[in-house]
Amino acid sequence: MQLTVSAVRPDTLAQAKYQAILVAVHGKRLSTAAASIDAASAGALTQAINQADFDGKAGQTLSLYGLQGVHAGLVLVVGAGSDETLAEQAWHNVVNAATKALPKGITSALSTLSDVVVANRDELERISDHARYALEASYRFDQHKSKKTESKPLKLTLAVSSANKAAKDAVVWGQCIGTGQNFARDLGNQPGNVAYPGYLAEMARALGDDGSVDVEVLGETEMLKLGMNALLSVSAGSVNEAQLAVMTYKGGKAKDAPVVLVGKGITFDTGGISLKPGAGMDEMKFDMCGAASVLGVMAAVKLAKLKLNVIGVIACAENMPSGTATRPGDIVKTMSGQTVEILNTDAEGRLVLCDALTYVERFKPAAVIDVATLTGACVVALGKVATGLFSTNDALAEEIAAAGQRVDDRAWRMPVWDDYQELLDSPFADMANIGGPTAGSITAACYLQRFTKAYPWAHLDIAGTAWLSGAKKGATGRPVPLLLEFLRARAAG
């Protein structure tokens, strides 16, 4: 999809040279753009709405073909709700529904939807949103199908009040978010026999092909020398070697401390010796969505040329059962020197992350955010709506939560209180890797917190938000929008 902006007066819409025009209707009230089309068509738009019993609910669409007096062959009427102001989540649904309603044969379309009034969003923000949501809605993953969905490239023009530099920059930013999000979705949707640890490392290397990102990849020999025994304990049962990829983007001043993102990259999680039930295990290919998100963010950051120093680290391993796999009860020494009794090999994400979180101390970071599909307990607590946000740093937590709210990629803060730490006690090691049957997402965060004393830290548990199941099964690319908005705000400083 190609996205651009154009200053188009409402009274010229009827003669605009596009195959399709998108206009909003608020309940039964026509937007300015819809009213212009209605006037040009001698009331045909209103008549069609009434005959179709179209009530203008947010996300409802009605396709009108061959309206007399209108050059475009298709006028797509899009419901924007009956309220004067649209909620952010409803606005997301409006653009998604409108984009999906465009027929595959359409190659040029003009959208006037950025004129919709949205709560807490000015015009430039709506332009960015529109671009991002349109890319999100047009996403397809069919590279492994023998018969692929055929569609011609769509040039979508957003009608704006002024096609100035600010508006053009807003479209570009929306494209960067959408591109990064869709890249993360592509990675997450790959099967485990394709996206093994080495594959993710190659994806990291590819980001550095143009010289805008420095990439270093550590294999198991290098990690063993560093004492990353917790991470290596996860890959012990797999024939695929673990990888730690470090991507460094230097967009800020040389002296500025970087923001570091650490992604969990378990490319397939059987649970290891603590084997998962077979039903639904195919979805464990999504257990690398934290790493996929970090890769998506790094791809977008370099596209946007963000004026900030950012380092992305992905800790990648495959958790498999075999004769060499780690056993429940085994004790490993982490890179930090702390020891861990592994009571459950299915609590492996925290084992790869703890060594990665120790490793990133060398960068003297301004902040570290780890991203992981870490616990089923977080899904129980927050479902598929909100990402779990854990931090002992109030300012950082508030910054992240606010960024998520601004881009409709919301996170909800959970406690990381010392009261929970005793649940990780072990009689044989410094800690256990699980904390018992209660407060699972919190004890997982408490475990990670023990490795993050050297810098401001936050943990995003995306087990509920990284992918969808059922008929809409697939990676969502979350929390790429949240992280990019957080970084953009930091860069704006």
Image: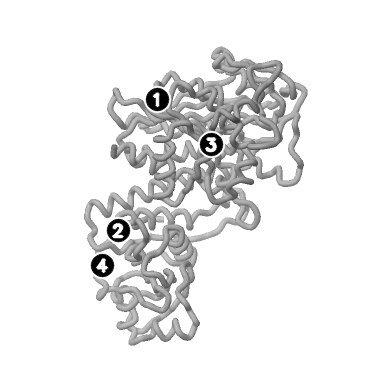
**C-alpha gap between disc 3 and disc 2:** 36 Å
**Disc 3 residue crowd, few under 14, some 14–19, many 20+, Cα 10 Å:** some
Which of disc 1 and disc 4 is earlier in sequence? 4
Secondary structure of the residue carrying numbered label 1: loop
> Which residue is under mark 2?
123
Looking at the picture, which amino acid does disc 1 mark?
Answer: Pro
Which of disc 1 and disc 3 is earlier in sequence? 1
* Residue at (40% x, 73% y) in the render: 26
Q: Is residue 441 above or below residue 62?
A: above
Look at the image and name its color scheme.
Answer: one colour
Which of disc 3 and disc 4 is earlier in sequence? 4
Do callouts 3 and 1 mark residues in contact (Cβ within 8 Å)? no
**C-alpha gap between disc 4 and disc 3:** 50 Å
> Which residue is under mark 1?
365
* Residue at (68% x, 23% y) in the render: 236
Q: Position of residue 177 (x, y in %)?
A: 41, 47
* Residue at (53% x, 27% y) in the render: 449
Q: Quadrant of residue 228?
A: top right
Which of disc 2 and disc 4 is earlier in sequence? 4
> Which residue is under mark 4?
8
Q: Is residue 476 above or below residue 444?
A: below
**C-alpha gap between disc 1 and disc 2:** 34 Å
Q: Quadrant of residue 30?
A: bottom left
Q: Position of residue 226 (x, y in %)?
A: 54, 14
Q: Quadrant of residue 83?
A: bottom left
Do callouts 4 and 2 mark residues in contact (Cβ within 8 Å)? no
325 horizontally vs 110: left or right: right
Q: Which mark is residue 415?
A: 3
Looking at the picture, which amino acid does disc 3 mark?
Answer: Pro
125 horizontally vs 416: left or right: left
From the viewer's side, name the closer residue of 278 and 365. 365
From the viewer's side, name the closer residue of 25 and 322. 25
